[in-house]
Image (cartoon, grey):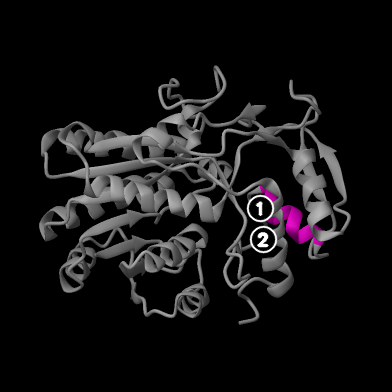
C-alpha cells in the first residue's frame, strides 16, 4: 500500500516514515520544509534501507497535492503538516487557521478528486482545554484554550462531517498528548528550529550545555511537587499507534468509519520529575529556575487510554527511562541537531 505522509520530514513525520516502511508500505512524503530538514529523510532511508519518494510542496496547493496523489497511486494519507505551537498561535491566529484548517480542507478536496478516501489525522489533547476530570477520556468536554487547539478541533469537526456525508471516507483522529524521545539508532530525533517550545528538547539542550538553564513555569499547581504534570509518550509508541489506526481503518465497519482515540500512556509526570529522570539518563545536571505560570497552561493532564486499546488494539510500551535515554542518545550523536549535516 502507498501512503502519503504530509509533513513527513518533521519530528513525528520522519519517525512515522520509519514505522510504515518497516511494516512494508511504500511511502511518499509531502513537505514544504518550513520547519524541517531533508537530512531527516536521508536518515530515514539509512535506517530502513528503503527509498522514499519526496515532493516539496505545500499542503495548501490543492492542484499539486491532487497531481502527486494520482502520480504515486496513493491509497491513504497520514496528515501531520501544520503549525503546532500553542503560544505562537495566540500571536499569529490567521496563519494557524490558514495552515491547519484551510490546508486540511484543500488536502481533503485533492483526495476526493483523486479518489483517495482514507486519512489519519494528527490532532491534540489541547482540544480538551482545562481538564475537568482525570484521566482525560475521549468523551471529555471540548474547550480548547488557544487558536492552535481550536484549529485542530475545527478540523476534527470537518472530518466528522465529511464522513457523515459519504460512506466511502475513513478517518482516524488521533489526539496526541506529549511526544518525546527519538529513534533508538540516534539517527533521527526532535530538532526544533530556534528556542524549543516543548519541555524535553529544552531539558536536553541544557544538559548538553547548549543552553544555560531551564525555566520552570509555576511551582504552585495542585500537584505533588507544585509543577505541571503531563502525559509524555515515546515517539516510537506514538507512530506505532498510527500503524494500528491505519490497519483499523483498512478493516473498518460501517459503524467505525471515523473514530477518535487518545495516544498517551495514562501516566503523568511533573516537570521536576522529568528533569530528574533526564539527569539520571544523561549523568548531567540540569540547572533550572522557577518562573511565573504562563497564561493558558493547565496544572495537570494525562490520558485515558482504554479506547485506543479497544478500537485500534494499541497501548504505549516504552517507559520514561527509555524516553530520556533515547533523547540523550540522539543529542549526543547530534549535538547541533541536523544542522551539522
Say left or right for 50 vs 177: left
Q: Position of residue 90 (x, y in %)?
A: 53, 39
Identify the disc placed on residue 313: none
- Name the residue rendered at 51%, 29% in the picture: 304
User: Start and end of the magenta stretch?
Assistant: 199-207
Say left or right for 80 vs 133: left
SS state under label 1: helix
Query: In the rendered view, would you say 201 is above or below 228?
Result: below
Residue 196: image quadrant is: bottom right
Identify the disc placed on residue 326: 2
Q: How many C-alpha atoms fall within 10 Å of the one at disc 2: few (<14), some, or many (≥20)? A: many
Q: CA distance from mark 2 to mark 1?
A: 6 Å
- Name the residue rendered at 52%, 51% in the picture: 237
Query: Is residue 281 highlighted in magenta?
Result: no
Query: Is residue 200 highlighted in magenta?
Result: yes
Counting labels gives 2
Query: In the rendered view, would you say 2 is above or below 90?
Result: below
Res 83 seen here: no
The kind of secondary structure the magenta stretch mainly shows is: helix
Instruction: Name the residue carrying label 1.
Output: 323
Of residues 307 and 120, the one drawn nearer to the viewer in this rendering: 307
Amino acid at each position: 500500500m502507498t501512503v502519503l505522509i504530509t509533513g513527513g520530514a518533521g519530528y513525528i513525520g520522519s519517525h512515522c516514515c520509519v514505522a510504515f516502511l518497516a511494516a512494508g508500505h511504500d511511502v511518499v512524503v509531502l513537505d514544504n520544509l518550513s520547519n524541517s530538514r531533508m537530512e531527516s529523510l536521508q536518515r530515514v532511508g539509512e535506517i530502513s534501507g528503503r527509498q522514499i519518494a519526496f515532493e516539496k510542496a505545500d499542503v495548501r496547493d490543492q492542484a499539486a497535492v491532487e497531481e502527486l496523489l494520482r502520480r504515486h497511486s496513493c491509497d491513504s494519507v497520514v496528515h501531520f503538516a501544520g503549525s503546532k505551537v500553542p503560544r505562537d498561535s495566540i500571536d499569529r491566529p490567521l496563519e494557524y487557521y490558514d495552515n491547519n484548517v484551510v490546508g486540511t480542507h484543500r488536502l481533503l478536496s485533492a483526495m476526493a478528486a483523486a479518489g483517495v478516501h482514507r486519512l489519519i489525522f494528527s490532532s491534540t489533547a489541547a482540544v480538551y482545554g482545562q481538564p475537568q476530570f482525570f484521566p482525560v477520556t475521549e468523551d471529555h468536554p471540548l474547550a480548547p484554550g488557544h487558536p492552535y487547539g481550536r484549529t485542530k478541533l475545527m478540523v476534527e469537526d470537518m472530518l466528522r462531517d465529511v464522513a457523515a456525508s459519504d460512506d466511502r471516507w475513513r478517518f482516524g483522529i488521533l489526539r496526541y498528548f506529549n511526544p518525546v524521545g527519538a529513534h533508538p539508532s540516534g539517527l533521527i530525533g526532535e530538532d526544533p528550529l530556534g528556542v524549543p517550545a516543548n519541555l524535553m528538547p529544552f531539558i536536553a539542550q541544557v544538559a548538553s550545555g547548549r543552553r544555560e538553564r531551564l525555566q520552570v513555569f509555576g511551582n504552585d499547581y495542585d500537584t505533588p511537587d507544585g509543577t505541571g504534570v503531563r502525559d509524555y509518550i515515546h515517539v516510537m509508541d506514538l507512530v506505532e499507534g498510527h500503524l494500528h489506526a491505519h490497519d483499523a481503518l483498512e478493516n473498518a465497519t460501517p459503524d467505525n468509519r471515523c473514530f477518535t482515540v487518545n495516544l498517551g500512556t495514562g501516566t503523568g509526570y511533573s516537570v521536576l520529575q522529568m528533569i530528574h529522570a533526564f539527569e539520571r539518563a544523561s549523568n548531567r545536571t540540569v540547572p533550572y529556575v522557577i518562573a511565573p505560570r504562563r497564561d493558558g497552561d493547565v496544572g495537570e493532564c494525562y490520558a485515558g487510554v482504554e479506547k485506543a486499546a479497544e478500537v485500534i488494539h494499541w497501548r504505549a510500551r516504552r517507559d520514561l527511562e527509555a524516553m530520556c535515554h533515547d533523547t540523550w542518545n540522539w543529542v549526543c550523536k547530534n549535538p547541533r541537531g541536523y544542522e551539522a549535516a
